[in-house]
Image (cartoon, grey):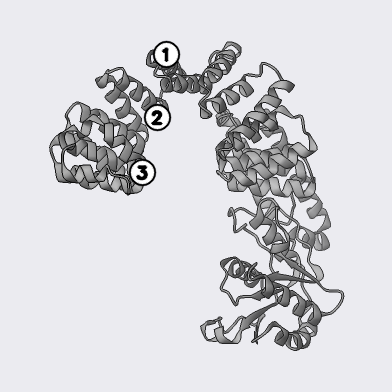
Amino acid sequence: MGQIIRCPLVGTPCMKEIIIQDKTFFLAEAEKPEDDRKRRIQAINESIGDGYEIRSALDEKGINAFTCKICEMIQTCAYGIADITSNNPNVLFELGIMIALGKATLILLRKDQEIGLKLPSDLNAIEVIPFTEYIDTIDQLRAIVPKLPPPISPPSPIKDLEKIQPQFAEEIRGMEANIVREFKSSIEEAKLDTISLREEKKEIPAELSERIAKLEEMLKELAGLGFTTDAKTAFLRGNYYYNQGKYSEALASYDWSLQLKLDHIGTLNNLGNTYFKLERYEEALDDFNHALELKPDDPDILNNRGLTFSNLQRHEDALADFNRALELRPDDPTSLHNRGFTYGKLERHEEALADFNRALELRPDDHDTLYSRGAVYYKLKKYEQALANVNRFLELRPDNPDALNSRGLTYYELRRYDEALTDYDRSLELRPDDPDTLNNRGITYSYLQRYDDALADYSRALQLKPDDAGTLYNLACLFSLWGKVDEALDNLEKAIKGDEKYREMAKTDKDFDNIRDNPHFKKLMESD
C-alpha cells in the first residue's frame, strides 16, 4: 500500500508519519440528502460488524487545513468505501486519493446510475456494489469485507535501512538531527520565529536566505526518507512559508504542528493570520476565537481578530476588540491605528483622526497610519492635509501603486491635473491592469477634454472588470460631454441596471446637462 509522497494540496513532501489502523474504513460520502446519509451509515454498520470503525470527513467539522487532514485520515484507514451516487466532487476527490494509494476500496452506486460509471479494467482493488436501497448493500458487504486483503503499512526507507544497515541508518539520523538544529537556529537568526499580521515580508540577508532555502529543501528530502517533523520545526517551517507568501504550504505546516501540540496558542494565531492572508476570514475567525478562549487577554490576538471582524464588515465587533486591546496595552500604536481605521469605516472621522494622531506621536513614520490618516482627511475634503500625509507615505514607500493612485485623486480634487496624471501613469507602470486607477485617469482625461485617451482607459477597465457599473457610468459621462448622445444613454442605462445608485447620481451630475432634456434620459431618471 502506498503513501502520499507529495501533498496534493501544496505539492511538497508530506511531513506526517502514517500508521495504518487495522479494521478502519474511510467513508467518502455526500452530506446531503441527510436521510440517505443516515440509511447509508446504518447499512454499513450493520454489515461490517463490531470491531470496525467508520471514519468520514463529514464528522470532522471545524478542523484546520481541512484537505490536509482528510488526506491523512484516508491514508491511516485500512480500507475505503465511496458512495458516488450523487457524483459529489468531494467524494470523487477522496476516491481518487484512495485509488492512488492502492487502497482496497468498495464503491456504492445506485443501479440506475451504473451505465454512467466507467472504471479502468486494471483497478483490481476496486469493487462496485450496486443497490436500489441502502438496505440492499448489507448482504453484499457482509460477503466482501471478510475477503479484503490485510492492509500493508506504507514504506519507510529509514526504517527499512535500520534492519539491514543499522549503523548507516544511525549516521543518517544524526545528519537529520543536525539539519533540523541548523534550520531552527537559522530561522531564529532571520527573526522568523515570530510573525505579525500587519508586518510586511521580512528582508533576510542573501546568504542567510540561501542557507534557509537549502535547509528547507533538505527537510523535504528527509520527509521522503520517512522522517517526520516535530511540532516546533513544523511551526517554524510554517513561519518560513508565511514570510515567502506561500500560504497553502504554511497552512499544512501549522496544521501538523497543531496536531502534535494541541491548543498551542502561537500556532492557532499563525493559522488565523494565514487564513486572513488567503482572505478566508471565517476560518481565520475560528482560529482567533480558539486562541482567545485559551488566552483571553492577549492584545495581539485581539488585534488580529479585530482586523478579521473588520474584513467581515463586523465593525462594531472589531471596535470592541481594539478597545479591549488598548485597555490591556494603552498607547499601543498598532491598536490605535486599527481602532482609528475602524472608526473611519463607521464614519466617525474625528475619533479616527484622534487615534491616528496619537499613534503617529508614538510612531511618527508608521506608513500605514499616515496612509489611513490621509484617507480620512480626503473623506473630510481636507485635501491639503490629505496630500501632506500621502506625500510622507511616499517618501517612505516611493513605489506604492495604491498611494500613487490616492495622491492622484487628491491632486485632481486640488485641480492639479498634470500632477494627478503623472501619479496615475506611475501607478499603472507598477500595476498596469488596475481598473480603479484606469478609471481615475480616465476621469482626469475626460475633464481635460482628452476624450480619446479617456475612452481608451475606460475600455481597458471594462476588459479587466466586465459590466462594472462604475466604469459604465464614467463612460456615460464621457459620451455625454463628447456629444455622443446614444452611447451616453446606452451606457447610463447599463450602469443603472448594475447599481441603482447611479440613477440618483445622474439626476444632479453636471456631465449630463447636455442630454438632460432628452426623453430617454428623463425616462431613465424615473424609478421603476
Measured from the top left, where is residue 268 in percent x and y?
71, 41
User: Which residue position is annotated with label 3?
Assistant: 500
- Dot 3 falls on a residue whose secondary structure is loop
Question: Left or right: 168 with respect to 379?
Answer: right
Give the position of the N terminus as an image quadrant.
Answer: bottom right
The front one of 327 and 390 is 327
Between the C-alphas of marks 3 and 1, the distance is 33 Å
Q: Residues within 10 Å of mark 3 (few under 14, many from 20)?
A: few
Q: Is residue 257 left or right of residue 393?
A: right
According to the picture, the residue beneath numbered tag 1 turns out to be: 385
Which residue bears the numbered disc 2?
Answer: 401
Kindly state the secondary structure of the residue where label 1 is placed: helix
Q: How many numbered discs?
A: 3
Q: Is residue 180 above or below residue 189?
A: below
Q: Position of residue 320 (x, y in %)?
A: 66, 29
Q: Is residue 452 visible in the rendered structure shown here? A: no
Labels 2 and 3: the sequence-earlier one: 2
Badge 3 vs badge 1, beta-carbon distance below 8 Å: no
Compute the Cα span from label 1 to label 2: 20 Å
* CB under 8 Å between discs 2 and 3: no
Residue drawn at x 56%, y 23% as measured from the top left: 340
Q: Nearer the viewer, residue 393 or 331?
A: 331
Q: Nearer the viewer, mark 1 or mark 2?
A: 1
> Disc 3 residue type?
Glu
